[in-house]
Amino acid sequence: MEINEANVFEQPLHVGRPNMGDRDKFLALASEIFDRRWLTNDGPLVREFESSLSEFLGVKHVIAVANCTLGLELVVEGLGLTGEVIVPSFTFVATAHAIAWRGLRPVFADIDPETHTLDVESVRNRITSETSAILAVHLWGRPAAVRELQQLADEYGLKLILDAAHAFGVATESGSIGNFGVAEIFSFHATKFFNSFEGGAISTNDDVLAANLRLSRNFGFAGEDNVIRLGSNAKMTEICAAMGLVNLDDVEKFTEINTSNFERYSRKLADIRGITLHEVAPEGTKSNHQYVVALVAGGRRDDVISDLRSHNVLARRYFWPGAHRMEPYRSHWPNAGKGLPHTEAVADQVVVLPTGSAIDADAIDRVTDIIAGTLAR
Ligand SMILES: Cc1ncc(COP(=O)(O)O)c(C=O)c1O
């Protein structure tokens, strides 16, 4: 390939470079933590973070956790799920792992190629007498088909859980993400547009589930020396809650930056043949635009990525090759791909481009120029 020296970035341009809130506010909270010597175990900052999140999401209960993966595991356990749980394969592998880790079987359903979220008919076709739940993902922050999935779950007496790792700050006409299904689970990992270093939160309007999750994230302790149920260690630390609180103050600013980046990519990519931008915000949706997802046709996706990388733009394939092609699922169900044609096709075309506060309009123009050069060859 030809390298256009003028377009080589001096510093690597990463996907998911962390957004950082106000340094002084964070240091002031860190200083309070030093004074209090209360580092973890349901500290005052964790409680404040939880109530701020409840208010932000408009949901009754928020249980802060160490990360989204543990949050998913606690929900699977807390709901007493058994047997099979239907999930997309086109997601980060943690969605499936959380089920398998609890000794259940993830059953992979296909996605709708337009939305990249679970295809409701594909889910219906996989329901058996062993199915106990549907775990859908708001992939890229695009809301899953919650109404239809809830109807299906009700029809068969299943629980609906939503992996909302990508969907913090997303709202639909029927309300904010965080209020659907029996519980939704967010990730505040460093690479998410809203982070608490590492972290996550479970949101639910179910009082009994919330009370159980509070116990299970802390080994099942109901008081000193009094363990009343099975539990794990999924507690959020005070320093993570401090980062979450500080970043929450800037969440609208981060969203505005992402939205304006998305709009610029959209204008620039519209003129390039062979690449299309994935729509993450259908009519009536407020999006966080944390991912700029493009689809490259004609088997040229990997050329685009390798040219971008030669220019120090660290664009990425995501969620390639699909969880069903990763271990242990690949060995258990080697033919799963036959029932997942859209997952396979989409996973082969997706490229995720850098966004967030680390990129500006000029950099987006250079990135899209590199892509145009590749696809013109
Ligand atoms: C869809 C999805 N689910 C779950 C997770 C796991 O989140 P965490 O890293 O907070 O455990 C991620 C993380 O990237 C994700 O993208």
Image: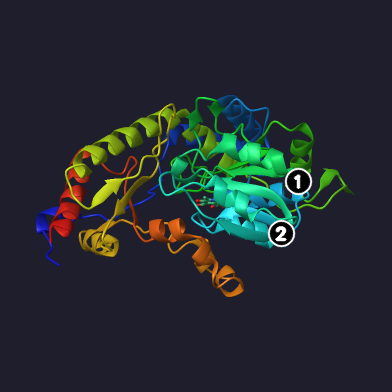
Is residue 38 in view from this perspective? no
- Ranked by sequence position, the earlier of labels 1 and 2 is 1
Looking at this view, is 68 or 206 the one in front?
A: 206
| 184 relative to 15, above or below | above
Residue at 40 percent of width and 34 percent of height? 281
Q: Position of residue 286 (x, y in %)?
A: 43, 29
- Numbered-mark total: 2
Q: Secondary structure at mark 1?
A: loop
Q: Position of residue 367 (x, y in %)?
A: 21, 50
Q: Residue at x 39, y 56 (%)?
A: 346
Image location (x, y in percent) of residue 32: 59, 34
Quadrant where the C terminus lies?
Answer: bottom left
Instruction: Evaluate whether residue 160 shows in this view.
Output: yes
Q: Is residue 49 above or below residue 309?
A: above
Q: Residues within 10 Å of mark 1 (few under 14, many from 20)?
A: some
Residue 103: quadrant of the picture = bottom right
Q: Give the amino acid at mark 1.
A: Leu
In this rendering, would 137 be left or right of 305? right
Residue at which label 2 appears: 102
Closest to the observer: 72 or 242? 72
Q: Which residue is mark 1?
A: 79
